[in-house]
Amino acid sequence: MTTPVVGSENSALNDAMHQPLQLNNFTVKNRIFRSNISGQFDHYDGSGSNVRINWEEKFAREGIGAIISSFVPISRQGRIVPNYAMIDDDDKIPFWEELGQAVHRHDCRYILQLSHSGRQRDIPDIQYPKGLSSTGKNEPLHGFECTRMTKSDIDRVVEQFAQGALRAKKAGLDGVELHGANGYLINQFLSSGINDRKDECGGSLENRARFVREIARAIRREVGDDFHLQMKISGTDYNNAVFPWEGRGNSLDESIKVCQWLEQDGVNAFHVSSGSMFPHPRNPPGGLPMDVLRNTYAGMAASGRHTVRNFLLFRMWPTGPFFSWWWRHRGGPIIQGISLDDARLIKRAVSVPVISTGGYQSASVVNRALEDGDCDAISIARSLLANPDLLKIWEGGADQPERPCTYCNKCLVNGTMNPIGCYELSRFDSPKQMIEGIYSIFHPREYP
């Protein structure tokens, strides 16, 4: 049953979440952002499809203030999986322009997430079997192989980020976000638990931050000061959450200092998450459905040095149940607002808006975080995947949906082989209803 919020529907519309937010040179109509979540909607060459437009418009029409795109690779070598739309060439601009126009029709803003996987990839590009990274060490969970970046590699990737931002501006989008969290390339440079370089991009925090600061400055040179630039950052790395023998990685104090430097470099907002890998026990928090994981993980079996080992361990007893318990145990008991404490302290240290992500789906929790000044906006992925009309449910006076997200993470583990969607059967009247929801984004089709 839904839990009512004290007051009428009209009073709900006066809540903190419904107040506008100014970001650089544009206004977001409310404080609810759709966080970066997506599926393999597009073509292998990185060109976009109508399915992605359907996907983004699905959330825009439900009243969300702004959408942060899914992982948008700035190069083929930076892909996490194939079939994600890219921003690596000018020929991609018309697609992103069309997508932006579709979202804008619903008075929703669109922020493109500029991304590079580094060593953290699920299914490599056929042209690039190895990723690039700050280190030459394989990614620890799956054993994805990588090459330590040279100075010329770094300069090239910095320019790819800058050109990606310029293309987003030419496409008429509202801004860009640097994906500097969750174990992807920028995080691989920032994290003391991953970066083992001995040159000017390793060692001290100032050196480890050099890569992302060069990216921010290069973007500003290309797009000027009037185009929004934000950064997704892991407040705390928790780099040893899965493997205790790994280094802890960056502390919150270190991330605060990085945010202060990036604000000086022209970053207009920070999107606070946690964890130096993806998935991570704290991102996204919740369960790890081993029955689904065993079936879908087979598609990754040839991707890394440890994937076959992991596939067998997930299928066996007692290793499979133990890994599932360990994952949940290391994530902790909090799901809603799991990174809010980090966001609060970052907000106190900077003068630009701060967005908090982490399992939000209760209006009371969201409004409290905003009213207390812990953050300026919140971002949601899974809970909107489960209930795209979540904001309208809140506007109607309910604290939570009748069928809330269960945080089972079946959406996540299905992502490498199946369409993105909610796969928790208990939330539906029948399997048919669940499948119809998953397939809904394929309509309207691109061609008659």
Image: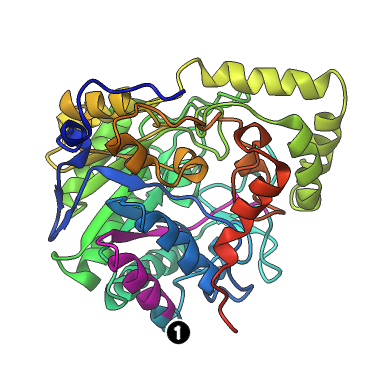
Q: Amino acid at mark 1?
A: Asp
Q: Position of residue 303 (x, y in %)?
A: 75, 52
Q: Is residue 368 above or below residue 41?
A: above
Q: Position of residue 172 (x, y in %)?
A: 27, 74
Q: Quadrant of residue 292?
A: top right
**Is residue 429 in view?**
yes
**Residue 102 on the magenta span:** yes
- Residues 4 and 99: in front is 4
Residue at 59% across / 83% down in the picture? 447
Q: Position of residue 443 (x, y in %)?
A: 56, 68
Q: Which residues are magenta?
A: 95-122
Q: Which residue is mark 1?
A: 91
Residue at 22% across / 34% down in the picture? 9
Q: Is residue 86 left or right of residue 164?
A: right
- Residues 25 and 134: in front is 25
**Is residue 211 in view?**
no
Q: Quadrant of residue 250?
A: top left
Q: Quadrant of the C terminus?
A: bottom right
**Residue 1 on the magenta span:** no
Residue at 65% across / 31% down in the picture? 426
Q: Position of residue 86 (x, y in %)?
A: 49, 70
